[in-house]
């Protein structure tokens, strides 16, 4: 199982919007530059995120993109679902009719368990959590840091 670039870049773009959430709408070119993502590819990602009401788009002189909800109200699982259509380790986990052995197959149960744990992790992480992880990882915080 491998996330596509759409899912990975979408998560990074949403994190970028969350980091800059208290500013006015953010220009797509700024997100693209900070995240090193092609602006054309990012436009496609944002179209899906706007359609799913995770992001709002504002036109005009002070236009751009912003989160539609608070970072604490958006889960990583939502982003991945919108951009990837869900995550399935195997076709038989996604649809039991895909394999006639799925009802008696032990490995199907294992793949389903792995998938459930993976979704549990994705559902447990909000954009706010990701911002906090980013701030910790980069050594930045909302308050001034003092070094002695």
Image (tube, rainbow, N blue to C red):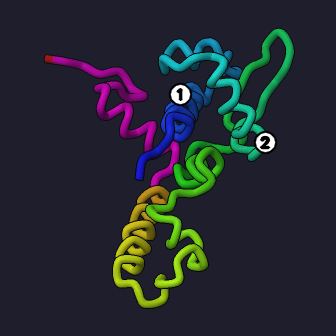
Position above or below: 78 against 127: below
Q: Secondary structure at mark 1?
A: helix
Between the C-alphas of marks 2 and 1, the distance is: 19 Å
**Where on the picture, by quarter, is residue 29?**
top right
Query: Left or right: where does residue 31 sit relative to residue 147?
Result: right
Return the disc, 2 or 1, that comes first in the chain's sequence: 1
Query: Left or right: where does residue 81 sit relative to residue 138?
Result: right
Q: Position of residue 106 (x, y in %)?
A: 35, 84
The residue sitting at 74% across, 46% down in the picture is: 52
Position above or below: 131 against 90: above
For the C terminus, which image quadrant? top left
Of residue 107 and residue 45, the one placed in the foreground of this image is: 107
The residue sitting at 79% across, 17% down in the picture is: 63
Residue 51, numbered circle: 2
Identify the residue at the far front of this view: 100
Which residue does the numbered mark 1 point to in the structure image? 16
Which region of the structure is painted magenta?
125-147
Query: Left or right: where does residue 121 sit relative to residue 81?
Result: left
Q: Secondary structure at mark 2?
A: helix
Position above or below: 107 against 33: below
Of residue 4 and residue 139, the one placed in the foreground of this image is: 4
């Amino acid at each position: 199982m491998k996330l596509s670039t759409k899912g990975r870049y979408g998560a990074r773009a949403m994190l970028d919007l969350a980091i800059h959430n208290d500013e006015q709408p953010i220009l797509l070119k700024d997100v693209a530059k900070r995240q090193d993502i092609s602006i054309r590819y990012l436009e496609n990602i944002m179209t899906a995120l706007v359609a799913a009401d995770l992001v709002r788009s504002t036109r005009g002189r002070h236009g751009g993109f912003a989160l539609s909800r608070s970072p604490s109200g958006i889960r990583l699982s939502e982003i991945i679902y919108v951009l990837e259509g869900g995550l399935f380790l195997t076709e038989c986990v996604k649809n039991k009719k895909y394999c006639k052995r799925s009802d008696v197959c032990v490995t199907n149960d294992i793949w389903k368990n792995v998938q459930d744990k993976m979704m549990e992790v994705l559902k447990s992480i909000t954009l706010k959590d990701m911002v906090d992880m980013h701030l910790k990882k980069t050594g930045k915080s909302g308050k001034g840091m003092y070094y002695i």
